Image (tube, rainbow, N blue to C red):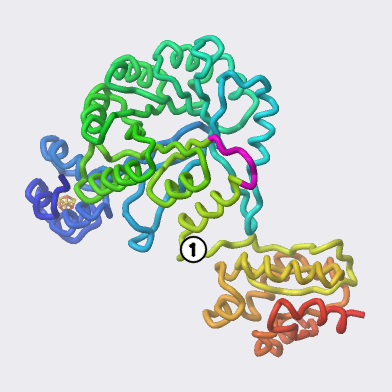
Amino acid sequence: MALSGLDIYKHLPKTNCKKCGCPTCLAFAMALAAKKTSLDKCPDITEAAKQILDSASLPPMATITIGEGAKKVEIGGETVMFRHEKTFYHPTAIAISVSDNETNIQEKIEKIKKLHFDRVGMMVGVDLIALKNDSNDTDKFAAVAKELTDKSELPLILLSDNPQTIEESLKNISQKRPLVYCANSKNFEQMSRIAKQYNVPLCICGKDIEELAELSQKITALAVKDIVLDCSTRAVSKCIQNFTKIRRLALKKNFRPLGFPVIAFAENVTEASAYICKYANILITTLDKPEEILPLITLRLNIYTDPQKPIMMEPKLYAVGTPNENSPFMVTTNFSLTYFTVTPEIENSKIPVWLLVCDAEGMSVLTAWAADKFNAEIIDTWMKKTDVANKVKHKKIIIPGYVSVMSGKLEELTGWQVLVGPKEAAAIPKYLKTIWK
Ligand code: SF4
């Protein structure tokens, strides 16, 4: 159970020395209860109190890392039931299942590579490969696991409840930190020993939430800390009910045995969508066509994108088409929706353009101007940073129609002639064809 601020306060030194950064011990206790600080900030706490309070300082849901390097995947670490309460941190990791009976692994890898897409300036795609032990052959499974590790950058999930098969595979690939699936009531001691020895995360499978909690406690006691939970049932409604209970118990009741990410399995887009919405941290699916995966990734983006952090483009000078020194020079903000509305219209005009995207903290033109994040000084700064003067010789800037008010100041600062473009992107082709002859 979660400790309240007053419960925590009872165990603090009560000297109000401020070394933790809080004005009083009570303030520190309140911050700790709200997970806004960590216990190690108080240097004077006794060992006995530390042990009691350790649970209060742990996050309610552990963050688990699968894989290593640039493609490693982090799951869990969530602190709220609903995004509007704060934010979600780690999107559902999507894993494509591959059988160890697959005849052409290379072909399968190539197919999985095509499940990556450019969405509003971000590369998004599937995150993991889940290797199934259909052959029941330890050597074959280990060989395919090695081949997948060598040929694909995506981290693996090893699906086998046979400890020997898992250990044989890990001998070659443990440094890539695959997720081992799964430990159950029969094999958990061996699986825990293997997970600990090879330092890999372990998924636990229980027939219901009670068994899952019991197994989680036993496995944690065997010093395995990186755990993922599978509540066994594959019926969508029951599974979502279980996921909701698990998350509620972890976040609201601070029930440690269930404070871990959960895994789901889906055979079709409807099931997969339901699991992405509530509350799968990993989704293993047999779906492997772009037209099946893209809608799931779009749904995932909708749910996991933080509306408080707009999706931004890199601020820089973009060449739309193949502009030269006589091409028009336009300017806008780095709100990605603005960029992806403006550039297709420039392309429609068939006139190549230099497009300067200024850093406006991801705001659209009018909002950024109102917030003083897109003004004459900022445009002047970005023109200098991107060395526009050496790429364009006509010294004319086209600014968005909504910010015509900055024309005079911008001319003064830059010495360039300011042309006021249209207010709406749809009018860009006609405008360019008229003005740039
Ligand atoms: Fe209290 Fe410890 Fe903070 Fe000092 S450092 S004010 S003793 S909680």
Left or right: 354 as drawn, with respect to 194: right
Residue 436 appears anywhere in the view: yes
Mark 1 element type: loop
Please name the residue shown 86% across and 83% down the image. 435
Left or right: 176 as drawn, with respect to 151: left
Q: Residues within 10 Å of mark 1 (few under 14, many from 20)?
A: few
Whether 266 is among the magenta residues is no
**Vertical position of residue 250 compared to residue 419: above or below:** above
What's drawn in magenta, residue-wise?
286-291
**Relative to the observer, which residue lies in front, 168 or 419?**
168
- Percent coordinates x, y for residue 11 in the rendering: 9, 46
**Residue 54 placement: quadrant:** top left
**Vertical position of residue 299 compared to residue 382: above or below:** above
Please name the residue shown 71% across and 82% down the image. 413
Q: Amino acid at mark 1?
A: Lys
Left or right: 384 as drawn, with respect to 25: right
Residue indicated by mark 1: 309
**Vertical position of residue 348 compared to residue 217: above or below:** below
> Where, quadrant-wise, is the C terminus in this rendering?
bottom right
